[in-house]
């Protein structure tokens, strides 16, 4: 194995652990069947300022980490074999 493979593998491992921890920290959304069927929504102060809450930050971090994870996996699968030839 080359040094690049070891480094990318370690980064993928680290990101996967971070993703697991962040997903476990997030709160579950309530499963309300009535609201799903009727399309009801709550316009409250909390809903309007959702982008500033802890949950919103965790959601953004989860999204960013998952995109980086996906790109690194594609890099390992497509580009790394071409570099090792």
Image (cartoon, grey):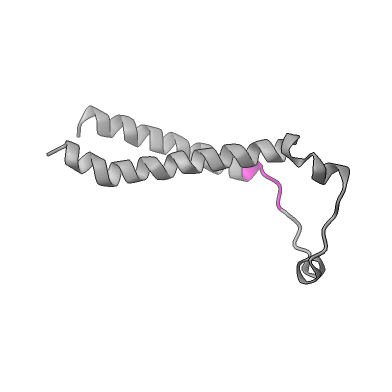
Give the left or right position of residue 35, taking residue 69 as reference. Answer: right
- Can residue 26 be found in the magenta stretch? yes
Instruction: Give me the residue at 33% from left, 33% from top.
Output: 8
Q: How many marks?
A: 0
Q: Characterize the magenta stretch by its predominant secondary structure.
A: loop
- Above or below, comparing residue 5 to residue 43 in the picture: above
Q: Position of residue 36 (x, y in %)?
A: 76, 67
Instruction: Give me the residue at 23% from left, 39% from top.
Output: 80
> Between residues 34 and 3, which one lies in front from this camera angle?
34
- Above or below, comparing residue 34 to residue 52 in the picture: below
Q: Quarter of the image holding residue 33?
A: bottom right
Instruction: Give me the residue at 67% from left, 44% from top.
Output: 26
Residue furthest to the right in view is 44
Q: Position of residue 50 (x, y in %)?
A: 76, 41
Q: Quarter of the image holding residue 13?
A: top left
The magenta region covers 24-28
- Above or below, comparing residue 28 to residue 81 in the picture: below
Instruction: Give me the residue at 33% from left, 36% from top.
Output: 9
Give the left or right position of residue 6, taking residue 13 as reference. Answer: left
Name the quadrant of the N terminus: top left
Q: Position of residue 61 (x, y in %)?
A: 58, 37
Q: Quarter of the image holding residue 68?
A: top left
Q: Position of residue 41 (x, y in %)?
A: 82, 58
Give the left or right position of residue 57, taking residue 64 as reference. Answer: right
Name the quadrant of the C terminus: top left
Residue furthest to the bottom in view is 37
- Can residue 34 be found in the magenta stretch? no
> Between residues 39 and 15, which one lies in front from this camera angle?
39
- Above or below, comparing residue 31 to residue 16 in the picture: below
Give the left or right position of residue 46, taking residue 17 as reference. Answer: right
């Amino acid at each position: 194995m080359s040094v690049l493979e070891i480094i990318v593998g370690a980064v993928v491992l680290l990101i996967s652990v971070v993703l697991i921890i962040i997903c476990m920290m997030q709160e579950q959304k309530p499963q309300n069947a009535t609201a799903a069927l009727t399309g009801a929504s709550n316009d409250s102060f909390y809903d309007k300022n959702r982008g500033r809450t802890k949950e919103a930050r965790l959601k953004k971090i989860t999204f960013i980490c998952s995109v980086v994870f996906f790109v690194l996996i594609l890099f390992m699968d497509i580009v790394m074999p071409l570099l090792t030839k």
